[in-house]
Amino acid sequence: MSKKKALTALLLAIMSTTAFAKSTLTLYTSQPTEDAQVTVSAFEKAHPDMEVKWIRDGTSKLIARLQAELAAGGAAPDVLLIADSVTMESLKQQHLLAPYSSPQAARFAAQLYDKEGYYYGTKLITTGIAYHSKAPVKPTSWQDLLKPELKNMTTLPSPLYSGAAQIHQATLMTDPALGWGYYEKLKENGAMPQNGNGAVMSAITSGSKAYGVLVDYMAIREKAKGAPIEFVFPKEGVSIVTEPVAMLKGAKNPEGAKAFIDFVLSDEGQKLVLQQGYLPADAALPVPAGFPPRDSIKLMPFDAVKALADTEANKKRFADLFGNR
């Protein structure tokens, strides 16, 4: 081969490699590992020019990692997909997020995303009442857990450990018929906190407790597997965790981050949420198997800014009432 032909071949190889080089997107997510892999694979299929490097952990651990990386001047992720809006609001107030006006937002209820575009809810994980299939009373209301005949039969996740429980607590504070008075009455009726939702579910399915405050999908999935557990969406409404997505300020791949946000909010991304067994944020989509009709699920109002401001006071008051459980 002549030098000219060899040089031409080398240039073509370089151009080919450059043309097909993928941009890298770094994602931190608290999704369960299987769900995260499905989400990433679907995004990469929709965007073959991108490769996602992702780290999965609990929300609190991811945020601690992020804060440590930023303090050390290290690399930070491009995009976050984590459990709750209160954590996102905290990051927003610390000026760690970048706003993005996703064209997909118009399809969602205003309460599901930040009005300035700093974060967007991707699904609805509600907290309602779970109960053992042989429980003596079939509850329909939050007030049912206060009935004398349910004395010492109820358990609930502690907001000292569970982010969903923190949001549930903050949500109930805004309802004049519930609020702190409701928690005080739960205590009087012998309600016993557990560390998290998993412990609540175990207590119910084992029969050690007949009733519990629990996130929807855990109970509904266990029932589908044959566990003796039922779930009800109380008539007063349910609190919601929205698993929001956001772009980090100073993201190395902002266009990739925007594409990821658009994807999880898109029709394709929301159908993926449905396939994973969660209630999609897009109200136009149906509900997963085991859920009642969407119009029968009442969502209680929630203010992430107020919830963040009240977090420490709420935790302290809960600890004073129930102990550090």
Image (cartoon, rainbow, N blue to C red):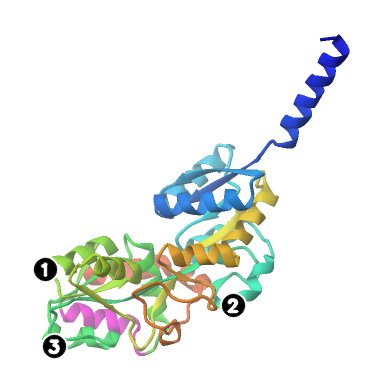
Can see residue 196? no
Secondary structure of residue under mark 1: loop
Where does the magenta region start and end?
Answer: 177-189
Q: Which percent across, then down, holds residue 324?
A: 24, 62
Contact flag, marks 2 and 3 (Cβ < 8 Å)? no
Secondary structure of residue under mark 3: helix
Vertical arrangement, residue 212 with respect to residue 276, above or below: below
Q: Identify the image quadrant of residue 229.
A: bottom left
Vertical arrangement, residue 55 with respect to residue 228, above or below: above
Q: Amino acid at mark 1?
A: Ser
Residue carrying label 2: 110
Residue carrying label 3: 148
Residue carrying label 1: 208
* Front residue (pair 156, 6): 6
Direction from residue 118 to residue 133 in the image, left or right: left
Q: Which percent across, then down, holds residue 302?
A: 48, 77
Q: Earlier in the sequence, mark 1 or mark 2?
A: 2
Q: Earlier in the sequence, mark 2 or mark 3?
A: 2
Contact flag, marks 1 and 3 (Cβ < 8 Å)? no
Pick the quarter of the image with the C terminus. Answer: bottom left
Q: CA distance from mark 2 to mark 3?
A: 39 Å
Q: CA distance from mark 1 to mark 2?
A: 40 Å
Vertical arrangement, residue 142 with respect to residue 2, above or below: below
Q: Earlier in the sequence, mark 1 or mark 3?
A: 3
Contact flag, marks 1 and 2 (Cβ < 8 Å)? no
Camera-nearest label, 2 or 3: 2
Q: Which percent across, then down, holds residue 252?
A: 67, 43
Q: Amino acid at mark 3?
A: Pro
Q: Amino acid at mark 2?
A: Ala
Q: Which percent across, then down, holds residue 99?
A: 67, 61
Camera-nearest label, 1 or 3: 1
